[in-house]
Amino acid sequence: MNKPLEYWIALAAAAFYVFQRSSDKPIFNRLSMTAISSALGYSLTGDLVNITQRPEILVLVATTTLIYLLLDFSSAIISDRRLLIDMIRKVLKK
Amino acid sequence: MTGLRGFRQRNGNVGTVLILIAAAFIFLPSLFFRWLFIDLQSVTVNEDLQVVVKREIQRNFLGAFSATLRDADTDKIICFGEVSQPFEYKERAGKTNPIAFNFRQWASLEDRIALYACMRNGFLSGGRFYITTCHTAYFPNGWKIGGRCVSSNVFQPTAAAIKKLLED
């Protein structure tokens, strides 16, 4: 938890960006998506900095926003049942 | 709005493209580092502090490396060394495999003051340690492309090896 102030400002900015992005969703979904993205971004940053040798704040922002995109995409796929069923049918027909 | 249409409306914009470009720039070079620049397969240090390295240099590139010596039980950093300037890695040099290195050379501890500092921090016989070696590649203009880190085995230096290290 002993991170510089810049780190927390960057995390707050990334979290706010994620919150803003999902403006058409119910408030609970927006909050949970923001919390999940920020928590995973915070937790994974240390390891990813070691692997990539990139500045910590840059990795934090990229990870948090990328996780949001992945979460949003996967929830979109899951909620689009008709599309999912069509895709499964197509695969099974082949 | 739900489903993929909603996803496209929320994220089909310049912001998303910028995030993806930034993420690709940050993560992809490290992901493909071993195939693009140098594949450090293993770093083995024995109790006499002899370092044996298996690596493959894929092409000539401008690079640098750093080494962090850690206490294997507490993960505490004992010392850190790095080359002061990036230098040219030569593809043909990577063909000799495995290759032996001097411990002080590998751990960037050629400076005696740095070696003494390590010892003050607990690099003594009987302790259990490991080295994490990180390679970084640079563009010719000096901008960092990416890097990759590899940890050695855990080793326990003997008193004789530490004494020899100080005498070298």
Image (cartoon, rainbow, N blue to C red):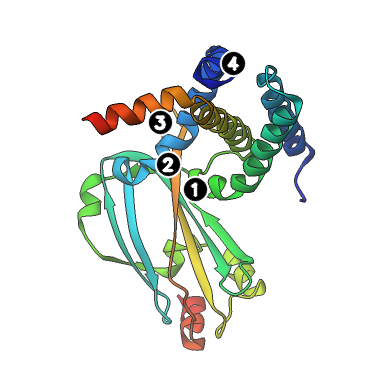
Residue A87 placed where, x, y %?
A: 35, 27
Q: Secondary structure at mark 4?
A: helix
Q: Nearer the viewer, mark 1 or mark 3?
A: 1
Mark 2, residues whose alpha carbon is within 10 Å: few (<14), some, or many (≥20)? many
**Which of the 4 image quarters holds residue B10?**
top right
Name the chain letter of the residue that bears numbered label 2: B
Residue A31 placed where, x, y %?
A: 74, 31
Q: Would you say the residues marked 2 and 1 are in contact, meaning their CB atoms lie under 8 Å apart?
A: yes
Q: Is B86 drawn above or below residue A22 in the view shown?
A: below
Q: Which of the two discs, 4 and 3, labels the residue nearer the N terminus?
A: 4
Q: Find residue B10 and name its label.
A: 4
Residue on which the image places disc 2: B30
Residue pictured at 28% horizontal, 31% vertical: A91
Which amino acid type is marked by label 3? Answer: Phe
Residue on which the image places disc 1: A51
Q: Would you say the residues marked 1 and 4 are in contact, meaning their CB atoms lie under 8 Å apart?
A: no
Residue pictured at 57% horizontal, 81% vertical: B127
Q: Secondary structure at mark 2?
A: helix
Residue on which the image places disc 3: B139
Mark 1, residues whose alpha carbon is within 10 Å: few (<14), some, or many (≥20)? some
Q: Are marks 3 and 2 on the same chain?
A: yes
Q: Would you say the residues marked 3 and 2 are in contact, meaning their CB atoms lie under 8 Å apart?
A: no
Q: Nearer the viewer, mark 3 or mark 2?
A: 2
Distance Cα–Cα, label 1 vs label 3: 19 Å
Which amino acid type is marked by label 2? Answer: Ser
Which residue is nearer to you in this view: A48 or A93? A93
